[in-house]
Image (spheres, rainbow, N blue to C red):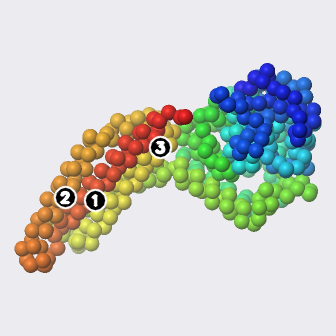
Amino acid sequence: MHDPGKSMELSGAAPAGATLCTEFVGDRAEKAGPAEDALQHLLPAGTVPGDVELSIVVPAANEELTVGEFVDWCREGIQRAGVTGQILIVDSSTDNTPRIVLEHGAEVLRTPKRGLGRAYTDAIPFIRGKWVIMGDADLTYDFRELAPFVEEFRKGAEFVMGSRFRGTIEKGAMPKLHRYFGTPLTTWLLNRIYHTNYSDIHCGMRGVTRAALEKLDLKSQSWEYASEMVLKAARLRLVTAEVPVKFYKDRAGRVSHHRRTGWLSPWIAGWLNLKVMLIYTPDSFLLKPGIALLALGLLLSLALAAGPIRIGNIGFSLYWMLFGVTCATLGYSSIQIGILARVLHGLRPQLVRRAQKFVTYDRGMLVSAVFVLAGAILLGALVYRYLKHGLRLEAISHPAILGLLLVILGFQTFCFTLLMEMAKRVVSRPEP
């Protein structure tokens, strides 16, 4: 939290009648200036910051057409919900947006333009409420109706999603591609992976406790922060709730961010969101299929190690064994990547501790050595016959193929053990 005593009257290019609060980070002060990371916290004149129950934190870029009325909506919503509140606009505008925000009595955090996700990360030190509600400053979400969010927070919710599909969507507010394809599809995918029950994972109006926001540790810089937040909330098993919201079309004269950046913008946003879903969920779609593939591969490879077999009218020969080797290799790789993903994300500390306790350096090296040695012995017999018959192979050696699989699994185990050791050091490394 910032100290009101560390404030000074703003001069120069900042809006008149505002107070500049300089945020101190360690022994260094973040002041307005040419530096890339400079932050400038502006308060309406006469405002004395104090603790509140609810903070509305909303990024804005060139929203002078709507931001004044938006702040008025927020004030009305805070009053209706019966809470004390803070309205903080994280601004990277080149128009009059910050001046209008201050004139309507809200706070401004001036930041370089570097993405929606980064805007929320920048805002964390300036948030004074125990509950946080996010959204857009374009009047597409009705911030006059905050009471449902507050009610869920009072019941103990840590993460409250808005839902346009459970609420109302004004005609023309959402493109048909988003409404009937993109949002339902990605919501369905996430619900299947995480066993959640959301109806609208891309709703921009959502709430989170400040403690949970810090725990989420958002890394995404752009639109994909929204998916990262939902994914991590599921992984961290935050107490979640969903409330209906109203969604309006853009005001006359305002062009949405997607339309400003061209027709490709929605597709880029969708691609970024899909990337986040894949990055934060590899263990979900790799571990169980990997176990099944490894089991099937080992069954076929071991059963055919002595040669072809026949079960009824079905013959299992070399091709089935090669299929088994392929399944075992892919399955083992999937399991390893899934475990590494869980360790690196650190979203399930108990599972991470179990994995790190089980996969030790000594144990991994021993297993890899046993696999490689056993495989080398089986391959050695083939090499001996190859040399004895004048560098020719007269018959297929099923045991040698099993030996090749063991060498592959041994090498994978060796590499996995090293990666786990490196991951342990990365995860446990103290932040500078």
Q: Is residue 281 above or below residue 133?
A: below
Residue 243 placed where, x, y %? 73, 40
The image shows a total of numbered marks equal to: 3
Residue 108 placed where, x, y %? 82, 37
Specify whether residue 327 is in view.
Answer: yes
Please state which amino acid type lies under the numbered disc 1.
Ile
User: In this view of the protein, which residue sits in the foreground, 230 or 163?
Assistant: 230
Q: Name which residue lies at 14% across and 59% down.
A: 377
Q: Are marks 3 and 2 in contact (CB under 8 Å)?
A: no
Q: Are marks 1 and 2 in contact (CB under 8 Å)?
A: yes
Quadrant of the image occupied by residue 42: top right
Please state which amino acid type lies under the numbered disc 3.
Leu
Q: Which of the numbered marks, if any, corresponds to residue 344?
A: 3
The mark that comes first in sequence, 3 or 2, is 3
Q: Are marks 3 and 1 in contact (CB under 8 Å)?
A: no
Please state which amino acid type lies under the numbered disc 2.
Gly
Image quarter in which the N terminus is found? top right
Q: Name which residue lies at 38% across and 47% down.
A: 419
Dot 1: what SS?
Answer: helix
Q: Which of the numbered marks, if any, corresponds to residue 375?
A: 2
The mark that comes first in sequence, 1 or 2, is 2
The CA distance from mark 3 to mark 1 is: 25 Å
Dot 3: what SS?
Answer: helix
Q: Name which residue lies at 50% across and 43% down.
A: 345
The CA distance from mark 3 to mark 2 is: 31 Å
